[in-house]
Image (cartoon, grey):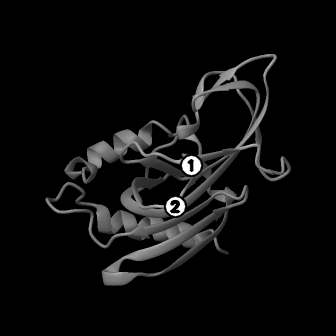
Amino acid sequence: MSGVFDEKNMMYALGKYLPSGEKIIAGIHACVSESQVNGIFTDCVLEDITLFPSQGGGEIKVRRLKYSGYDIYLGVTSRCLVIAECEDNRHLYKFDVDLDPKIVAVTKVREAFSLKDMGTCYPLEEIRRAEIRKGWMGSVKCKLEMKNGDTFKLMFPKLGGLGGGMPHHAQYRDEIIACLSKQNV
């Protein structure tokens, strides 16, 4: 767990999901208590939790859920919110759920795609609401709701772990909170 509180590890993990040309402005370790991520995929087949392109494949509607705590890295760029799990976690996957293609973007699968990578990068303008309030012992609680129905219940700790592996945590946390607060306007 100590490797979680390391800015180099964080930047590496977040970098895997950065859109081309984007750079992390601020990143922190955060805790998620509940999450829901939705996806609609076409022209694919599902094998285990990986989608593979297939011209004869159909449409797959999936909701990835987790109702227990897990650690993430949360970063912002000038245009995006990026989320990377600190460790490999298990999630509940529900298929053939009722998702509206007018709300949830339909993605044509062109290469192998793991459902573990759903919900890792959002344009800032896709944030419908960021409810921010004070938490216990200096923490900040944040409930994020995206326009496509994805939700995250987050907690931003006051400190970035012991040992000084995240020396910019307080500054970056303030920058992320300011960025998310702007999305509520």
Left or right side of 93 for 70? left
Residue 81 x %, y %: 54, 53
Residue 106 x %, y %: 78, 39
Q: Residues within 10 Å of mark 2 (few under 14, many from 20)?
A: few
User: Relative to 21, does residue 154 appear above or below in the rendering?
Assistant: below
Q: Nearer the viewer, residue 145 or 23?
A: 145
Q: Nearer the viewer, residue 5 or 170?
A: 5
Q: Secondary structure at mark 1?
A: strand
Q: Earlier in the sequence, mark 1 or mark 2?
A: 2
Q: Residue at x 42, y 47 (%)?
A: 85
Left or right side of 40 for 158? left
Q: Amino acid at mark 1?
A: Leu
Q: Amino acid at mark 2?
A: Tyr
Q: Residue at x 45, y 47 (%)?
A: 84
Query: In the drawing, what numbered circle is on residue 20?
Result: none
Q: Residue at x 36, y 82 (%)?
A: 136
Q: Residues within 10 Å of mark 1 (few under 14, many from 20)?
A: few
Q: Secondary structure at mark 2?
A: loop
**Disc 2: which residue:** 67
Q: Quadrant of residue 30?
A: bottom left
Left or right side of 147 for 157? left
**Disc 1: which residue:** 92
Q: CA distance from mark 1 to mark 2?
A: 9 Å
Residue 126 x %, y %: 68, 57
Q: Quadrant of residue 28?
A: bottom left
Q: Nearer the viewer, residue 18 or 147?
A: 147
The answer to whether the residues at label 1 and label 2 have Cβ atoms under 8 Å apart is yes
For the C terminus, give its image quadrant.
bottom right
